[in-house]
Amino acid sequence: MSHTTDSRPLDSAASGKIRKDHTVNWWLTAVVAVLSLTVLVPLYFTIVTALKTPAEAGGFALPSSWQWGNFVDAWNKVNYPKAALNSAIITVAAIVLTLLTNTFVAYAVARNMDKRFFRFLYYFFLAMMFVPFTVIMLPIAKEMGSLHLDNQVGLIVLYTILGLGTNLFIAIGFIRSIPVSLEEAARIDGAGTWRIFWTIIFPLMGPINATIAILTALWAWNDFLLPLITLTDQSNQTIPLAQYVFQSQFTSNYPMAFSSYLMAMAPVLIVYVFAQKWVIGGVMRGAVK
């Protein structure tokens, strides 16, 4: 003789709990919606202006005729392929060098936080995050010039060094959450520090490495000040710098200028849309763990 238990009350309670947990906070939603306008309104203005004639520029109304030729003119005026190639080379090289160096420094500091020297290094690098760039801008320009690094190589080195504080803050917390027993087992098998890092620690840092890579890419691609004070050869100029050089030509043609801004923003915006979960997740893991 079988016995069946009616589970409908439990199901009702569970569904009620789920509905309660997923209740929308309308006040918070309204605040987020209002704050989002600070980004959406300028973005809308940029898009509609880029598709207008110079005579129509300046308002929020849709263009009477869509001027797609503004993007072609901006492409030619800014020499977009050359500037984009320079930006891509600098960005990719900065990402690779950052991942190969900053993560290893984070590993060394994380595993030696009980020692005074490494603790000092940790707080020293974190202090770099709070130094305004305008304070060190002129010394950096002089130093790069005296070392003959006022070129793309010097710019890549600067991105690697100046990003060290943020990258340590993100990576160290995650590394300290990795069990030391994994490394001890590898040392028993005869593995050295370098082998342990590249075969065990570095692969486990996949989410953090993705976060560091994306943040470095966003910074290097969009940055204006470092290329401005570092690069002396105009053939090496990045997209933001190329737009600045040709700014005087766009003073009476805002649609062309805004078209160039949208083309410069498009690649990194696409990357961020698809990779934002790694940015948020990596920062949270590094901060909490």
Image (cartoon, grey):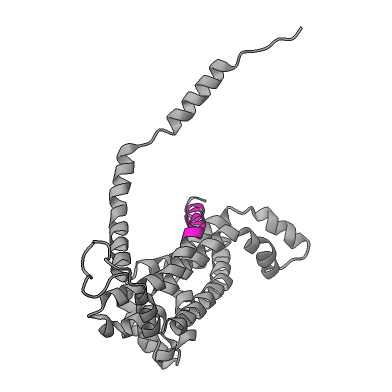
4 on left or right of 70: right
> In which image quadrant can residue 6 be found?
top right
Extreme-top residue of the structure: 1
248 on left or right of 102: left
230 on left or right of 8: left
- Position of the N terminus by quadrant: top right
Query: How many numbered callouts?
Result: 0
Instruction: Say if 9 sits above or below 251 in the image.
Output: above
Residue 120 appearing in the image: no
Task: Tell me if residue 283 is in the magenta stretch.
Answer: yes
Q: Nearer the viewer, residue 27 or 95?
A: 27
**Residue 224 image position (x, y, % from top left):** 36, 77
Which residue is rendered at x = 32% and y = 81% of the image?
A: 244
Q: Nearer the viewer, residue 78 or 185?
A: 78
18 on left or right of 64: right
Q: Nearer the viewer, residue 11 or 213?
A: 11
Which residue is rendered at x = 32% and y = 47% of the image?
A: 32
Residue 139 appearing in the image: yes
Extreme-right residue of the structure: 189
Q: Nearer the viewer, residue 73 or 286?
A: 73
Which residue is rendered at x = 47% and y = 26% of the image?
A: 17
- Which secondary structure is most common in the magenta stretch? helix
Magenta-tinted stretch: 273-286
Task: Tell me if residue 241 is in the magenta stretch.
Answer: no
Instruction: Say if 134 sits above or below 271 in the image.
Output: below
**Residue 19 image position (x, y, % from top left):** 45, 29
